[in-house]
Amino acid sequence: MSVEDKLAELGLTLPQPAAPVAAYVPVVIAGGMAYVSGQVSMTDGVLIKGRLGENMGPDEGIAAAQACGLMIVAQLKAALGGDLSRVERIVKLGAFVSSTADFIDQPKVANGASELMVALFGEAGRHARSAVGVPVLPLGVAVEIDAIVAVRPA
């Protein structure tokens, strides 16, 4: 089953790949690896802002992380000429969660993206990961996630 079929089965759609907001590119492919720049939490072009433990709960954070995961896949699809079958393995996700000093569920929040990768790519979606709490993220978003992905040649 293709990634697109799995998305449809889950009732999800990929967003339009977001344009960079500063001096970087969304994806760099080098040496069989795709390095996906940090994707911020947004749905339908609207930023998901907030701080876990302050004005957002874990479930809202999980949804924000899933939105980051969807944007990572959208960026990959664009960088791979629309061919997600070239994704060989999700190698690593780096999750940054805007949170208060006493919020300790960053790993649970990051699961929103991690579980999406497994749902879409199966065993190839299992990855290494970091989940870090930070006091603030760009544009006031709740979550930002970057990715390292092994890709097959075209």
Image: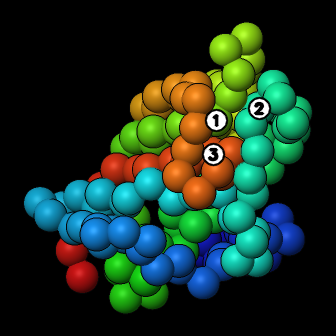
Secondary structure at badge 1 equals strand
Asked whether 44 or 114 is in front, the reply is 44
- The residue carrying mark 1 is 98
Q: Quadrant of residue 10?
A: bottom right
16 relative to 42, above or below: below
User: Answer yes or no: do the residues labelled 2 and 1 have beta carbons within 8 Å?
Assistant: yes
Q: Position of residue 23 (x, y in %)?
A: 28, 69
Q: Position of residue 2 (x, y in %)?
A: 60, 74
Asked whether 28 or 89 is in front, the reply is 28
- The residue carrying mark 3 is 143
Q: Position of residue 92 (x, y in %)?
A: 40, 40
Residue drawn at (15%, 64%) of the image = 30
- The residue carrying mark 2 is 52
- Near mark 1 (Cα within 10 A), the count class, few <14, some 14-19 or many ≥20, is many
Q: Amino acid at mark 2?
A: Leu
Give the left or right position of residue 151, taking residue 6 as reference. Answer: left
Q: Spatial distance from mark 3 to mark 1, Cα to Cα?
A: 6 Å
Counting residues from the start of the chain, the first of labels 3 and 1 encountered is: 1
Q: Position of residue 7 (x, y in %)?
A: 72, 71
Q: Amino acid at mark 3?
A: Val
**Mark 3 or 1, closer to the camera:** 1
Q: Identify the image quadrant of the C terminus.
A: bottom left
Counting residues from the start of the chain, the first of labels 2 and 1 encountered is: 2
Can you name the residue that lies furthest to the bottom here? 81
Counting residues from the start of the chain, the first of labels 2 and 3 encountered is: 2
Give the left or right position of residue 90, taking residue 11 as reference. Answer: left
The tag on residue 20 is none
- Near mark 2 (Cα within 10 A), the count class, few <14, some 14-19 or many ≥20, is many
Secondary structure at badge 3 equals strand
Q: Amino acid at mark 1?
A: Ser
Q: Spatial distance from mark 2 to mark 3, Cα to Cα?
A: 9 Å
